[in-house]
Image (spheres, coloured by chain):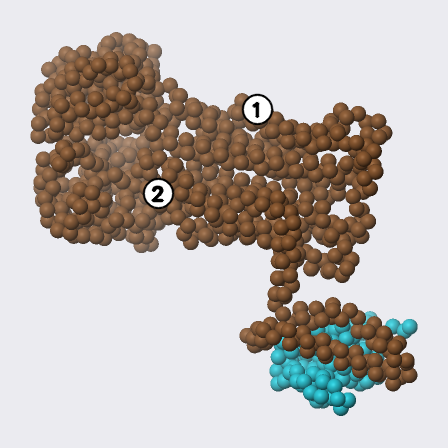
Chain colours: A brown, B cyan
Amino acid sequence: MAMKRFLNKLALLFRRDQFRNELDEEMAFHRVQVEQELVDGGMPREMARTAAMRQFGNATRLNEQSREVVGFRIESVIQDLRFALRQLRRSPGFALTATAILALGMGVSVAIFSFVDAALLEPLPYASPDRLLSVDESSALFLRSNLSRADYEDWKRENHSFSSLDAYTGTGYLLNTSSGTVPVPAARVSDGFFSTLGIKMMLGRGFLPGEDMPGKPKIAILTYGTWLRRYGGRSDIIGRAVDLSGADYTIVGVLPRTFEFAPRRDSEFWVPLLDKSGCEQRRSCHNLYGVGRLRDGITVDAARAEMKAIAAQLAKQYPGSNQGQSASVIPLAEIIVGPVRPVLLTLLAGAGLLLLIACVNVSSLLLVRSESRRREIAVRGALGATPARLARQFVTEGLLLTAAGCAGGMFTGVWLMKLLSRLIPQNMLVHLPFLGDVSMNAHVIAFAASIALLAALLLAATPVLRLSFQDIRDGLTEGERGAAGRLWKRLGANLVVVELAVAVVLLAGAGLLGKSFYRLLHVDNGFDTTHLATVQVMAPESTYTKDAQKIALYREIERRLGALPGVESVGITSDLPVQCNCDTDWIRIAGKPFHGEHNEVNEREVSPAYFATLKARLIGGRVFTAADDVNHPRVTVINEALAKKYFPGEDPIGKMIGEGDLAPNSMRQVIGVIANVREGAADDNVWPAEYFSIYHETDRFFSVAVRTTQDEKAMLPSIVSALHQIDPNMGVFAEKTMTQQIESSETSLLHQFATWLVAGFAVMALVLGVVGLYGVIAYSVSRRTREIGVRMALGAQRGTVYAMVMRQAGRLTGVGLAIGLVCAIGASLLMRKLLFGVQAWDLPTLLSVAFVLGCASMAASFLPARRAASVNPTDALRAE
Amino acid sequence: MTRRPELLPGTLDMLILKTLTRGALHGYGIALSIKRSSDDVLTVEEGSLYPALQRLLVQGWVMGEWKVTETGRRARFYTLTAAGRKQLNVELSQFEQMITAIGRVLRDPQEA
C-alpha cells in the first residue's frame, strides 16, 4: 500500500506540469458550473462570476494546497533553497564568516577525534584484542612490575583462566653489517607469544611449542621492516643464518607488515626465551612481562582473582623471594594507551568546547540576521506565508550554512590530521605507533556526521525559536523605532556569556598545562643538565667477559674521551638519570627491625668521576675512588631520600646495608650521601637510591656522560668516533645531550603536545568569544542609535554614553568570566592527571586569564562605544 | 447571513467515497450531490474538496478519468476503486461506532 502510494506520487512528480494544468482546468470547470448555477438562479452574469470566484477563494493557494498533498514538496524545497542561496549571496560577509567558523570547529573536532579513535577505540591490531590481558606481578611500590621467569613458569602451569599465557622481554644484540657493528633492539618471547596475539607469519613459521626451552636451537623471526631493510626483502630468507652478538641464529619466519607490538615496537629480531640469563635463574629477579588470552566465559576479575591466589600460594612457598608479591591483571590496551588517554580526552574535550563556541557564535550571527529581517518576515507573513513555511525558510538557510560549514570542516579535518600526525615527535610514535596511522575511517565519518547533525539542529532551531516568539504585527509596526528587541537582548547576551565562559575554560586549561610543562622541564633534577653529552654503549660479549677486561675498557673510555678537547670530565653509569624508577634492589638495614618487607630502592652502578661529572652535590662522606673495585670490600653511596627514609635522625656513614637475609657477601658499607639525583621521570617522585662502583659490579651495557666546556651537541660525533676507535666492534647508540634527553622523554612530549594544542584551541576560543562580544555590543549600539541621540539631546555627555556601552560589555564579560572561572576550576580538576606542580585553582593563572579576557573584551567593546559616543543627536533623531 | 453547520472533521473523505458508490462524478458533481442528498445542510467548500480528491487519488482509493460532459466541456470524472470501497467500509464502521458512542452519552447524561 505504502509502496503504491509512493509510486503514485512519483508518477505525479514526473508529470507535474500536466498535473498542474489538469488541476487548473478542473477548478475552472467547477467555477464555471457554480457561475452557471447562480445565473440559472437569476443572478446577473457579472455578479455570478464574482460570487463564484469569491466562493472559490484564493485559487493559487488552493492549487498549492492540492499540490502539497501530492508532491514531495520538492518544488517548495528548491524554492527555499534558491531563496536561501540568494540571501546568503546578498551578505557574503556573514555567509563566509559563519562557514569559516563552523568549518574550523568541525575540522578541529574531527581531527582530534580521529586520534582518539586510533588510540582509544581500536589501538590493538590483534585477533579479539579485548580478550588480551597484561599479566604481571605487583608489589607495594610497583603496581605493575615484571614477572620473574620462575614465577611465570608456575603461573603458566597452574592457571585455568587463560587459554594461553606468554611472556616477552626486551633485549639487544650486536649485529655485524657492512658498515660495522651496530646494536639492534630485539625481543625474547615465549613459544606461544605470536599465536596468543593471533599473528600469522608472512613468510616461514612462528615458534613451535617447546622451542623456548633452554638448550633448544637458536632461531629468530624478523619484522617486515628488518627483512626489507637488512635483507632486501629476499624470498629465500627462511633457513638463513644471522649472527646476533656472536651467536648463530636460524631465521624461521618473517612477521607481516601490519605487525605492531607497542611495548617492544622497535625490536627488529624476535627470538625464543631459550637459556636463562643470570637474572632468570633467580626467582627474585624480575625481567619478563606477561600477556595472556582469556578463556571464553572467564571475566577479567575472575582471572585477576585466580592469579592473585596463585601469587599468594607462591609467596607462602617461597617467602624469601615472593613475600608481598601479588598479581596485576589489566587489559593489554590499558598498558599501551593508558598514558595518552588523559591527554587525548582532554584534547577531545577542548575540541568539543571549541566546536560549541563555533556553533554558538554562528547561531548568534543567525539571530542578529533574523533580527534585522523582522520586517521581511512580517511582510511575508502578512502576504500569507504560514508560520511553518517561514520557519522552513530559516531552517533551509541554517541547513545550507551547516552543509557548507561541514564540507569545509571535513577538508579542515583531513588537513589538520595530516598536520598533527607530522607534529607528533618520532619518540612518541615509538611508544604509540597507532597515532601514526589516523585516517578518515568509518568511525570518524560517523562522528563527523553526528556533530554535523547536532550543528544543523542548533542552527535550524535558533531562528525558528526566535520566530515563534515574535508577533508579526510587532514586526510590521516596530520598524527601527526603539531599543533592541528584548528577546534578542536576552538570548544574544546569554549566548555571548556562554562563549566567554568557554573561552575562559580553555584559556585556563592552556595556562595550567603550560605552567605544568614549564615546571616539568624546570624540575629540580639534582644535577646540572646543561653541557652534558650522553651515549649508550654495548660491549661485545666475546671480548669483554672478565671483570678485568671490562674495567680496562672503562678506564680506556675515561682516558680517551677525557683527552678530547672541550671535555671537562667523563662519567660511566649503568643507567642515565631522568629515565625511570627501575632496575631496583631490595635492601635491609643491618641492626634494624625487619619483617621481610620489600624495601625497594633504585640501584645504579657508577664510575668514580660520575657524580663530579653530573655536578651532583655530596652531602656527607666520600664518593667512589678507583680503588673501590672487585679486590676491595663492597661500599655504597646513598641518596638523601634513602638516608631520610631508612636512617632518620642518624648519620648513615659507616652503617651496613644487605639483602633480605643479610648474607655476608651481600653486605656493603655506606661511605657517602649525595643530594637526590632524579633517576625517574620528571613527574615521578624521587625514590631512595643506592650507588655502587661500576669497577666493582661490571656490566657490558652502560652509558657514558660527558661534561663539556663547549656546545655539547657539537661534541656528540667526536665522542662516538672516539668510542669506535677504542673498539670498532662496540655498539654505540642513542647519542643525545641531556637536555634533548629530558625534552624528548615521553612525559615531556605528552605535556608538550597537550599544551600546544590546548593553547591553540584557547586562542581560537578567545578570538571567537571576543568577536561574539563585539557583535553583540555593536549590534546593540546600532539599534540604540536613536535612543542615544535622545539621551544626548537631553544633555547626556559623551563620557556617559561611553560608560553606558562599556558597562553593558563589562557586565557580560564579568558574568562570562565568573561562570568561566568556576567551570575552569572544575575542568582543571578533571584533568589534574595532566597537571604537574600546579593546582587546578592556581591563582596567578586564573588572574592572568581574567586579565587577558578582560583586556580583549574591553578592546572589542571600545570600538562600538566610540561609535555610540560620536553619534550626532540631530542626525540620529532626524534619521526616522 | 445564516451560518451553515460545518462538516464534521474527518468525514469529507467518507462522504466523497460514499457519493462515488453511485457512479462516476466530476468534482462539481460530487459537491452538488453531497449538497442535494443532505437537503442543503452540508456544503463542501471547494477549498477542501480538491485537496481531498488529490489525497484520495494518491492513496489509490479513487481513479480520475477525463471525459466530456453533456454541456460539452472536458471534466475529470472520479470513480471508486476496489481499495476505495474497502476504505469506505472501514470509515463507515468507525463512524457508526462513533455516532453510537456519542448517542449513548447524550441520551442519558444522569446515568453516566
Location of the N terminus of chain A by quadrant is bottom right
Residue at (44, 34) in percent of width and height: A754
Query: How many discs appear?
Result: 2
Q: What label sits on residue A847 in the rendered view? A: 1
Residue at (28, 45) in percent of width and height: A260
Say which quarter of the image contains residue A427.
Answer: top left
Q: Depth-wise, is mark 1 or mark 2 nearer the camera?
A: 2
Horizontal and vertical percent position of residue A60: 74, 69
Q: Mark 1 — on which chain does it sit?
A: A
Horizontal and vertical percent position of residue B86: 63, 83
Say which quarter of the image contains residue A142.
Answer: top left
The foreground one among A349 and A687 is A349
A142 on left or right of A98: left
Horizontal and vertical percent position of residue A829: 50, 32
Location of the C terminus of chain A by quadrant is top right
Q: What label sits on residue A485 in the rendered view? A: none
A226 on left or right of A54: left
User: Label 1: how many residues lie within 10 Å, few (<14), some (14-19) or many (20+)?
Assistant: few
- Look at label 2 and name its amino acid: Gly
Per the image, the residue denoted by label 2 is A436
The answer to whether one can see residue B19 in this image is no
Residue at (46, 25) in percent of width and height: A515
The single residue placed furthest to the bottom in the displayed view is B70
Residue A622's place in the image compared with A18, above or below, is above
The foreground one among A323 and A684 is A684
- Look at label 1 and name its amino acid: Leu
A875 on left or right of A513: right
Say which label, 1 or 2, has the lower sequence index. Answer: 2
Residue at (21, 36) in percent of width and height: A185
The answer to whether one can see residue A529 in this image is yes
Horizontal and vertical percent position of residue A25: 72, 78
Q: Mark 2 — on which chain does it sit?
A: A
